[in-house]
Amino acid sequence: MPLVNMSELLDEARRGDWALGSFSVADMEMVLGVLQAAEEEKSPVILQIAEVRLKNSPLELIGPLMVSAAENADVPVAVHFDHGLTYENIAKALDFGFSSVMFDGSALNFEENVKGTLEIASLAEEYGADVEAEIGAVGGSEDGSQDLAVRYTSPEEAQAFYRQTGVDALAVAIGNAHGNYSKEPHLSFDILEKIQNKLEIPLVLHGGTGLSAEDFKKCISLGIKKINIATATFDSVERAVGQAYKDEKVKGYYDLQAVMVKAAYENAKKHIKIFGSDGKA
Ligand code: 13P
């Protein structure tokens, strides 16, 4: 099964009542776990890594690993560069064969966000890759280093942004935030509905960790077709490893590796089932 374009998968999801899980990966164990879950559940899936994570997982190493894993998977897999901030690293990801890239201009003003997105869109076009952008600002930060406030997406601005950029997918801010929520999240479904009514494109929900199955399903019914999950995977792996040591189940490195893969697998499987992408490959 080849590496596929994200928009191909998102189009299929739009025809049905389901969404794609876009799982952040930091190493080979997470890639193995996510793909094992996707293959077992016969689910298309997206593997992603954010630019801020490259200090831990260098793109030169993790990029080819992700692309090769996708090319060798039994289910359709898109490989996505998440929260791209610099032209240089986005171009590098495209060179490695990533099938989609996100330009994160959420910290910029509207005009600069449009300009930056258009620059990346024209680069991505040369590679036949898809582009995701963000309008408004999702709370927190991808690597937990900043606690940025949510700037809710304005449906009018989202429509104007799409008209000017023609992106393939648009990330929205409706009260969602990266990392673990410090208090129970309350998503603004009314804003999401207004955005959906104005835009005919797949919408993206960042900050998937900590949202309930009900929230996910409601979002999916209102046009969310790609859901990003990062912290839940990192936390599951970390917790499982801690528990395995406590239970004295780790007798050597490969026991440890098996625990890591299994935790990533279980987390991906749980989300795939909630998102309804199982059986869609
Ligand atoms: P979480 O870490 O909250 O799952 O968010 C992931 C994300 O949105 C990556 O872009």
Image (spheres, grey):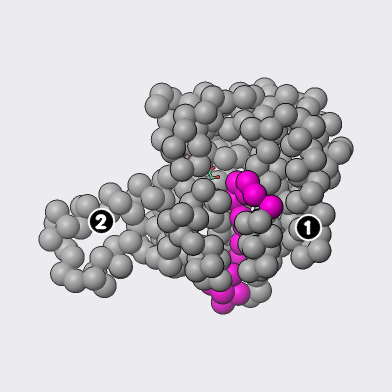
Residue beneath disc 2? 241
Q: In the figure, residue 198 lies in which quadrant?
A: top right
Q: Which residues are magenta?
A: 67-87
Instruction: Name above or below for residue 109 compared with residue 47.
Output: above
Q: How many marks?
A: 2
Residue 81 is covered by the magenta coloring: yes
Q: Position of residue 142 (x, y in %)?
A: 50, 42
Instruction: Name above or below for residue 137 compared with residue 49.
Output: above
Name the residue rendered at 74%, 56% in the picture.
Answer: 130
Q: Secondary structure at mark 1?
A: helix
Residue beneath disc 1? 123
Q: Quadrant of the N terminus?
A: bottom right
Disc 2 crowd, CA 10 A, few/some/many (<14, 14-19, 20+): many
Q: Quadrant of the C terminus?
A: bottom right
Q: Position of residue 114 (x, y in %)?
A: 79, 38
User: Quick check: can you spot residue 37?
Assistant: no
Residue 125 is covered by the magenta coloring: no
Marks 2 and 1, how far apart at CA = 41 Å
Disc 1 crowd, CA 10 A, few/some/many (<14, 14-19, 20+): some
Name the residue rendered at 43%, 25% in the picture.
Answer: 184
- The disc, 2 or 1, on the residue closer to the chain's N-terminal end is 1
Q: Amino acid at mark 2?
A: Val
Horizontal side of residue 101 vs 270, given as left or right: right
Q: Amino acid at mark 1?
A: Leu
